[in-house]
Image (spheres, helix red, strand yellow):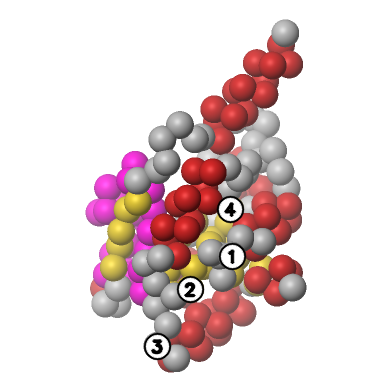
């Protein structure tokens, strides 16, 4: 069931610990994933290939609004975004977080690998020093060119102006 992949931080912590005891390499990434597009799917597939399990930290609606992306964001509710992510084969777990950053979630889960987009410098990635300090790795992945939720939002808004 898709809903079984959408869990609380406490449940995720127990699952991740169990995976790691079994020798699984756990990869963590996070984001809003508001309008899922090919760029997101490509990024998540690449992240998953770095290990055995992929955990996605998903910003709640309130934390998306605080990110200052656009007054209309998020376009989809957190429940809808979580369900769409959970449907992806590459995603093992989805964990909602309400804080401005996933720092607490990363420190709780202790993933083996922390991944963000290449628009981040490794030393600026939230939670990176914690992951490295626990023997893990921090990596960045290139985005698929031409894909952006903000560009999709602008295109939709522009089409309604005409």
33 sits left or right of 77 in the view: left
Residue name at image x 40 percent, y 65 percent: 49
Q: Which residues are magenta?
A: 110-132
Comes first in the chain, label 1 or label 2 = 2
Q: Secondary structure at mark 4?
A: strand
Task: State the mark number for residue 111.
Answer: none
Task: State the mark number for residue 23.
Answer: 3
Separation of residues labelled 4 and 3 (CA atoms):
28 Å
Density class for disc 1 (Cα within 10 Å; few <14, some 14-19, many ≥20) is: few
Task: State the mark number for residue 89.
Answer: 1
- Dot 1 and dot 2 residues touching (CB under 8 Å): no
Q: Is residue 115 magenta?
A: yes
Density class for disc 4 (Cα within 10 Å; few <14, some 14-19, many ≥20) is: many
Of discs 1 and 2, which sits in the foreground? 1
Residue 44: image location, x then y, percent: 48, 56
Q: Which residue is mark 2?
A: 53
Separation of residues labelled 2 and 4 (CA atoms):
20 Å
Instruction: Please say if 143 is above or below 31.
Output: above
Residue name at image x 72 percent, y 8 percent: 162
Residue 132: image location, x then y, percent: 27, 70
Separation of residues labelled 1 and 4 (CA atoms):
20 Å
Residue name at image x 53 percent, y 64 percent: 90
Residue name at image x 48 percent, y 73 percent: 53
Of discs 1 and 3, which sits in the foreground? 1
Comes first in the chain, label 1 or label 3 = 3
Q: Which residue is mark 4?
A: 59
Of all residues shown, which one is farthest toward the bottom? 21
Comes first in the chain, label 1 or label 4 = 4
Density class for disc 2 (Cα within 10 Å; few <14, some 14-19, many ≥20) is: many
Q: Secondary structure at mark 1?
A: loop
């Amino acid at each position: 069931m898709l809903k079984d992949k959408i869990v609380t931080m406490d449940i995720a912590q127990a699952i991740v610990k169990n995976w790691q005891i079994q020798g699984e390499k756990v990869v963590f990434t996070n984001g809003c994933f508001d309008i899922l597009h090919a760029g997101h799917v490509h990024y998540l597939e690449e992240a998953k290939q770095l290990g055995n399990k992929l955990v996605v930290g998903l910003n709640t609606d309130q934390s998306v609004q605080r990110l200052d992306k656009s007054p209309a964001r998020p376009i989809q509710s957190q429940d809808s975004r979580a369900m769409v992510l959970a449907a992806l084969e590459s995603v093992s777990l989805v964990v909602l977080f309400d804080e401005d950053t996933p720092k607490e979630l990363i420190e709780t889960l202790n993933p083996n690998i922390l991944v963000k987009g290449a628009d981040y410098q490794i030393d600026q990635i939230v939670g990176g020093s914690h992951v490295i300090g626990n023997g893990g790795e921090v990596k960045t992945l290139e985005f698929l060119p031409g894909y952006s939720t903000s560009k999709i939002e602008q295109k939709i808004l522009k089409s309604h102006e005409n």
